[in-house]
Image: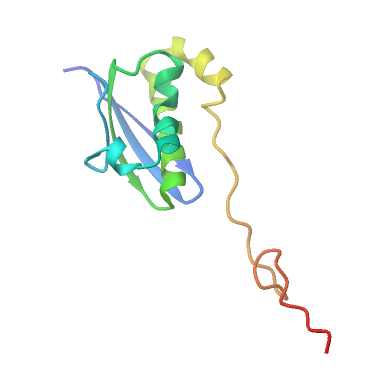
Amino acid sequence: MEKKKNTIGRRKEAVARVYINKGTGNITVNDKDYKSYFSLIYLQNQVELPLKTIDALDKFDVKVNAQGGGIKGQAEAIKLGIARGLCEVNIEFRPALKAAGLLKRDPRGVERKKPGKAKARRSFQFSKR
């Protein structure tokens, strides 16, 4: 059996543990097919993007455990995890993935709530009288 590469991708509160194997292009997220897990097409595209970038959509099997966050955060965490895993499989994939911006962890998170405000920036409703 081929060596299994495992990597981690993160985005906001979501964490994705990604296991990459040589295979036929099956992508499984939490024991479901990724197309049924991510019903929105653009989220499916996010998950496929690293594999499409190197034209290897049907060369690797990907198994993912995704936890935390929302559906979009999980999709983007998986995208980062797959990109990192592909770099471990073959270092020659790195320049193409880097040029597409797939190896950068998105650092944005939720801004903290401030005192005297309803949320991070939203003020309480103003009452003139």
Q: Is residue 15 left or right of residue 96?
A: left
Going by the picture, which residue comes out furthest to the right?
128
Q: Residue 28 placed where, x, y %? A: 26, 35
Q: State the residue in front, 38 or 17.
A: 38
Q: Is residue 128 left or right of residue 7?
A: right
53 vs 64: above or below:
above
Quarter of the rendering occupied by the N terminus: top left
Regarding residue 9, the answer to whether it shows in the image is: no
Q: How is the protein colored in the picture?
A: rainbow
Residue 74 on image: x %, y %: 41, 44
Residue 95 image position (x, y, % from top left): 53, 13
**Residue 83 appearing in the image:** yes
| Position of 32 relative to 98 (above/below) | below
Query: Is residue 114 positioned above or below 103 on the image?
Result: below
Question: Which residue shows up at 52% across the image and 26% down it?
Answer: 102
Residue drawn 33% across the image and 34% down it: 18
